[in-house]
Amino acid sequence: MQTALLALGLVLIVEGLAYALAPSLVVQVLEMLRALPESTRRNIGLGALAIGLLLVWIAKTLGA
């Protein structure tokens, strides 16, 4: 449970920074994503999921 709360907190920090520091860039990125085919967006999501799982596994292995 502690790891889930830590992960959620870190995600919110990164998301908040993106919207606080470059809101217009966020809009541009969303427009670019909208232009991609659904299969490409799905593959990007699966890749991000795999990288996230790997990072969590590494953090847990190192004692986080």
Image (cartoon, grey):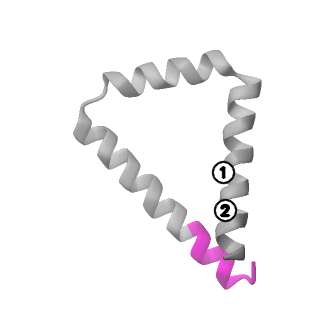
Q: Point out residue 58 in the picture as x, y percentages from the top left corner.
A: 62, 76
Label 2, secondary structure: give it.
Answer: helix
Crowding at dot 1, Cα within 10 Å, few <14 / some 14-19 / many 20+, comes out as few
Which of these two is toward me, 38 or 12?
A: 12
Q: Please tell me which residue is depicted at 53% across the width and 61% down the height of the picture.
A: 52
Q: Please tell me which residue is depicted at 43% across the width and 19% down the height of the picture.
A: 31
Question: What span is colored magenta in the figure?
Answer: 55-64
Q: Point out residue 61 in the picture as x, y percentages from the top left corner.
A: 66, 84
Relative to 33, say whether 58 is above or below: below
Instruction: Answer left or right for 21 relative to 48.
Output: right
Relative to 38, say whether 57 is above or below: below
Label 1, secondary structure: give it.
Answer: helix
Amino acid type, mark 2: Ala
Task: Determine whether label 1 and label 2 are within 8 Å by CB.
Answer: yes
Q: Mark 1 points at which residue?
A: 11
Q: Name the residue under label 2.
A: 7
Q: Distance between the Cα atoms at labels 1 and 2?
A: 6 Å
